[in-house]
């Protein structure tokens, strides 16, 4: 069975990759926000 016969095969690769990329960007954004808040004079505990 070739992967070209299955129309859902590319989706099984593309969708997890996009989801991982989005969550990774969100994780980095949350970390930078947390670091900038802890660097402020009055740290805000989220």
Image (spheres, rainbow, N blue to C red):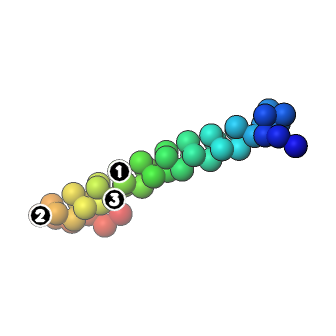
Can you name the residue that lies furthest to the right here?
A: 1
Question: Which residue is under mark 1?
Answer: 29
The one of 22 and 11 positioned closer to us in this rendering: 11
Direction from residue 35 to residue 29 in the image, left or right: right
Rendering quarter of residue 40: bottom left
**Residue 41: mark:** 2
**Residue 31: mark:** 3
Which element type, helix, strand or loop, lies under badge 2?
Answer: loop
The C terminus lies in quadrant = bottom left
Direction from residue 1 to residue 7 in the image, left or right: left
Which element type, helix, strand or loop, lies under badge 3?
Answer: helix
Which comes sooner in the sequence, label 3 or label 2?
Answer: 3
Q: Do the residues labelled 2 and 1 touch (CB within 8 Å)?
A: no
Which element type, helix, strand or loop, lies under badge 1?
Answer: helix
Can you name the residue that lies furthest to the front here?
A: 2
Q: Is residue 4 above or below residue 12?
A: above
Task: Identify the residue at image location x=71%, y=44%.
Answer: 12
Q: Position of residue 21 (x, y in %)?
A: 49, 46
Query: Label 2 neighbourhood size at 10 Å, few (<14), some (14-19), many (20+)?
Result: few
Task: Identify the residue at image location x=62%, y=40%.
Answer: 14
Q: Where is residue 25 in the image (x, y as percent from the top left)?
A: 41, 48
């Amino acid at each position: 069975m070739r992967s070209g016969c299955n129309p859902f095969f590319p989706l099984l690769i593309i969708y997890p990759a996009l989801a991982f990329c989005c969550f990774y960007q969100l994780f980095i954004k949350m970390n930078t926000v947390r670091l900038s808040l802890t660097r402020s004079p009055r740290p805000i505990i989220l």
